[in-house]
Image: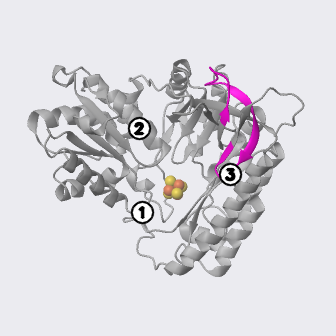
Amino acid sequence: MGLKKNPKLMSKKLYIKTFGCQMNEYDSNRIYESVSKIGYKKTEIFNEANCYILNTCHIRDKAKEKVYHEIGRLKKNFKSKQKPVVIVAGCVAQAENNEIIKREPYIDIVIGPQSYHKINDSILKHISKREKEQQTDFDTILKFDYFDKIRNNNNKISAFLTIQEGCDKFCKFCVVPYTRGPEYSRSFYKIIDEAKQLVKNGSKEITLLGQNVNAYLSKEKNKNFKLSDLIMSLEKISELKRIRYTTSHPKDMTDDLIECYRNSKKLVPFIHLPIQSGSNRILKLMNRKHTVEYYLSLHEKLKKINPKIEFSSDFIIAYPGETEKDFEETMNLVKKINFINSYSFIFSPRPGTAAFNLKLIEKDIAKERLKIIQDQLFNHQIYKNKRTENTLVNVLVENKMSNQKKFFGRTEHMTGTIFDGEKNIEGKVVPVLITSSNKNNLFGKVKLKKNIRAA
Ligand code: SF4
């Protein structure tokens, strides 16, 4: 496979634009590390690219149109320059494959997420034969075998680490089972090796990623390894300060994982656990495979272990068939749990999914319901942030802010915090005295713990 430097590509530049989720961000970093093996160097200047990769996301509305819009922009910019090798990667590439090249001949290579191990060969082949390349097989095992041999050089304070991909649950609205393929879990030992490498590079927080991260299950050396085993093993890496994971499914929230919230000192007391709707009838229509009561029982168990645990969720509003009563039930749940940092969207049909042809709820009604739920979610968020004012909050410092003397970091609950502080605090967990707040952020200054109550 193409892992040797190609002299012709040694001074060539690679630009990657990433849309969507944290997994795409992780993938883009790994793609760069693969492509750098044949000689490309990364550039942040889009105009000087010799190879342009668009890593796409299919979750949000108008994903396809966004791709064509970006390529249009690219064409305009390179009108009087040499055309770069143009690659469309990610979930739109997987879902649309040949169609994209047919509609936009400026694109040279289409590659789906489970074929990234073929990216070097595809580029080299395209350069030598000038043919279009399309790679959209589900070769997940080969992909991870390939990337396990390439060191992860990411040195961000907060790093992502993919442990699982794909999904077998087939919620009726979701494209993931079609774009990322069936559930696959990476080797436990390889994940631990990669985590140690990230910490060696300087990372202090690791977020374990998977479309169904808590369905993680790897059978190795006659043992079954679950997400809880990974968390308790990562716990032992002394320089690592925080562990997160996302995105989880309520059905896979097993007792061993719940117990980690008691046994791990590094697992943060924050969980993104999407419920999508507070109505059992809608959950059934969505094929979510859990009930509201079950979700509430998980909430109760976790809160009993640690009352500081906060929940975040995704909500799909106006799913086909949602009545006023169903929506009221969602609102009741939102008020009961007091979610923070959550996401809510009006249902939008994705081609190829079971819900694609269902009758939509009237736009005005959908918009009104979205406003009601967002007001509730945002008001609680404002209230919660306000309550942290004049208290000390532990913040992991991620970076100094550009053009400012301030630092940026996150609380255990993922709330972005901007604050004044001393030099050389990046990578440290520091107590920040919160002096003000808004919906999304806290503001303050680093303070020694003296006579101030801790939040
Ligand atoms: S469990 Fe998550 S990834 Fe799987 S189909 Fe449902 S929403 Fe999509």
Q: Where in the figure is residue 408, as x and y percent of width and height?
A: 61, 35
Q: Label 1: which residue?
A: 61
Comparing labels 3 and 1, the label whose residue is closer to the camera:
3
Q: Which mark is residue 344?
A: none
First reached walking from the N terminus: tag 3 or tag 1: 1
Mark 3 is on which residue type? Asn
Looking at the image, is 53 positioned above or below residue 56?
above
Q: Is 255 or 442 nearer to us in this picture? A: 442
Measured Cα–Cα span from mark 2 to mark 1: 21 Å
Mark 1, Cα crowd under 10 Å, few <14 / some 14-19 / many 20+, is few
Q: Where in the figure is residue 110, as x and y percent of width and height?
A: 25, 47
Measured Cα–Cα span from mark 2 to mark 3: 32 Å
In-image side of 9 versus 191 (left or right): left
In-image side of 166 versus 125 (left or right): right
Q: Label 3: which residue?
A: 438
Q: Where in the figure is residue 100, as x and y percent of width and height?
A: 23, 55
First reached walking from the N terminus: tag 2 or tag 3: 2
